[in-house]
């Protein structure tokens, strides 16, 4: 950062990137000039990731439950779930966004093809992140020792009660840190929906830059994203550290 | 002879190509304590898990009070509420306190009244001398204490049949006696027990019958006197010489 300011041309860096007036203008926007507010744009990012996180938590758990099930009856679903995770973990998220965002409206299938851009963005993010999160859950479920299952079942607990009382409470401890890491990525990846034309923070900053020939709006958007992700990162680090010290205490 | 509680008939269990139980037949009568001995890997733990329907067997039959447990109409969860099992490695639930470990079965499997179950659980914990540790987590307890909690966890289910898989191997020698007394008490109250063990003195002391398992075959069975003094098979003799 210091290099920016001290290097020759430092003053133009300050003017183009860190200009307080321009930063404020991009933050509040100016409807008369057709400038969207980066601040209001961020609200779109926020509701997108909140909605996606809820959906991802539910769909991811469903997929992981199916994949870790043993019943032969569920075999077709198991294959389907495996295919789903393979596909959506393997395709670049930008491609998924394009396919959903540009593809679905073209199909002309009633309501499915008449949603807002942000909704298509959410669908794409949810598809991809459900695949990631399903793997996180699966690792968590597998981390619970088999003896725990045997002990619970031998007490006459049903499969569901065993999951609820014994497996999930133990799996959650291992699952939360990687889950929060995925959420941090998800929060940032809502910016990719700008490629569809959704007016979220990144897109508003881009419009500002193109109109005013000043990049301070990008810095504002970056700072706003940092304000969201840094606290979550710190919180995740704290959880991991706490879990490690508890495990060490337990082992002694 | 009193009523037959558990009967295994020609039970075969394979893990892929590895035949671990090759046609094991065994009967337990009410009030009877049978000790299962045999070398490591002979299939003792597997046999106990099969008896608790924790494994699906490849052929043969298992019945409780003359009722086949392999019948489709039989709910394995209900069966397991009558057959309790204690494991070699305790398998206490690390996220639950000692008391909650003991309460899980009565409250969430038997759906018993929580206050009553709690009273009984505390009584059981005081019987094994661990009442004052009721609110601690299992990882704070020694191995021996954990195993005693695991036994208490099974006993509060009031099982008709108790399966024990080398429960004394982790116990401090000074605690073995009190656990034996506890098990003998239970036998008097009508609990039938099938106990896998490497401790021959324990077996001789508590068992009515000893069954010797050799690589998945139940080679011989008899009273402790018969089996320890006059083993019929060469393999049994060798095994007993090795462990004594
Ligand atoms: N879940 C499993 N999957 C595959 N093989 C298994 C499984 N459980 C047990 N076995 C195999 O079955 C055989 C018998 O194991 P088992 O644990 O029943 O022996 P054991 O008599 O209890 O031995 P120990 O005295 O060491 O406890 C071993 O060869 C073991 O490797
Ligand atoms: Mg064993």
Image: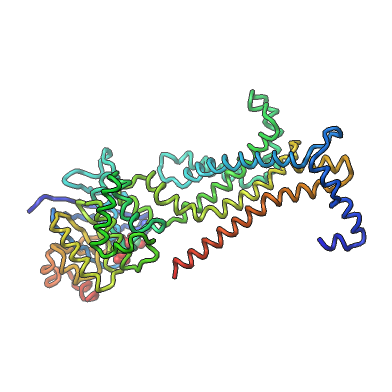
Residue at 71% from the left image edge and 49% from the top image edge: A225
Answer left or right for B123 relative to A3.
left
Which percent across, then down, holds residue A103?
A: 69, 32
Answer left or right for B1 relative to A173.
left
Which percent across, then down, holds residue A213?
A: 89, 44
State the colouring used for the structure image: rainbow
Q: Nearer the viewer, residue B237 or B81?
A: B81
| Quarter of the picture holding the N terminus of chain B | bottom left
**Does any portion of residue A43 appear in the rendered image?**
yes
Answer left or right for A199 relative to A112.
right
Q: Quadrant of residue A120?
A: top right
**Does any portion of residue B21 appear in the rendered image?**
no
Q: Residue furthest top?
A: A110
In this view, A45 is above or below B211: above
The image shows a total of numbered marks equal to 0
Q: Nearer the viewer, residue B153 or B218?
A: B153
Residue at 51% from the left image edge and 56% from the top image edge: A174
């Amino acid at each position: 950062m210091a290099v920016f300011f001290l290097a020759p041309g430092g003053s133009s860096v300050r003017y183009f990137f860190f200009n307080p007036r321009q930063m404020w203008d991009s933050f509040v926007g100016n409807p008369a000039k057709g400038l969207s507010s980066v601040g209001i744009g961020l609200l779109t990012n926020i509701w997108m990731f909140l909605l996606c996180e809820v959906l991802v938590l539910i769909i991811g758990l469903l997929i992981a439950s199916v994949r870790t099930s043993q019943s032969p009856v569920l075999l077709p679903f198991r294959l389907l779930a495996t295919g789903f995770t393979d596909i959506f973990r393997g395709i670049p998220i930008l491609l998924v966004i394009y396919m959903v965002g540009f593809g679905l409206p073209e199909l002309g299938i009633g309501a499915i093809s008449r949603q807002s851009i942000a909704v298509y963005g959410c669908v794409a993010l949810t598809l991809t992140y459900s695949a990631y999160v399903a793997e996180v859950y699966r690792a968590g479920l597998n981390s619970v020792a088999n003896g725990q299952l045997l002990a619970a079942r031998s007490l006459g607990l049903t499969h569901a009660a065993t999951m609820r009382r014994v497996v999930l409470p133990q799996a959650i401890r291992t699952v939360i840190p990687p889950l929060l890491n995925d959420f941090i990525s998800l929060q940032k990846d809502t910016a990719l929906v700008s490629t569809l034309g959704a007016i979220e923070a990144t897109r508003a900053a881009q419009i500002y830059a193109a109109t005013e020939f000043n990049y301070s709006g990008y810095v504002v958007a970056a700072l706003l994203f940092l304000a969201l992700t840094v606290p979550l990162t710190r919180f995740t680090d704290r959880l991991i550290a706490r879990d490690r010290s508890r495990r060490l205490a337990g082992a002694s | 002879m009193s009523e037959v509680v558990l009967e295994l008939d020609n039970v075969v269990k394979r893990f892929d190509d590895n035949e671990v139980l090759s046609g094991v037949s065994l009967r337990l009568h009410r009030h009877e304590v049978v000790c299962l001995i045999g070398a490591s890997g002979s299939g003792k733990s597997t046999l106990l898990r099969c008896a608790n329907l924790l494994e699906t067997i490849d052929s043969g039959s298992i019945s409780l009070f003359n009722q086949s447990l392999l019948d489709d109409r039989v709910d394995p969860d209900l069966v397991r509420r009558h057959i309790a099992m204690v494991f070699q490695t305790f398998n206490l639930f690390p996220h639950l306190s000692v008391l909650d470990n003991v309460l899980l079965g009565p409250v969430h499997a038997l759906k018993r009244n929580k206050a009553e179950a709690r009273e009984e659980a505390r009584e059981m914990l005081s019987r094994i001398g661990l009442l004052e540790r009721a609110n601690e987590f299992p990882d704070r307890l020694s191995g021996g204490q954990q195993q005693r909690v695991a036994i208490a966890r099974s006993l509060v289910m009031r099982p008709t049949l108790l399966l024990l898989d080398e429960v004394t191997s982790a116990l401090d020698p000074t605690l073995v006696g009190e656990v034996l007394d506890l098990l003998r008490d239970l036998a008097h109250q009508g609990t039938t027990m099938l106990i896998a063990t490497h401790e021959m003195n324990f077996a001789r002391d508590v068992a009515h019958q000893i069954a010797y398992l050799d690589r998945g075959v139940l080679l011989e069975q008899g009273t402790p006197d018969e089996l320890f003094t006059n083993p019929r098979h060469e393999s049994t003799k060798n095994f007993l010489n090795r462990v004594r």
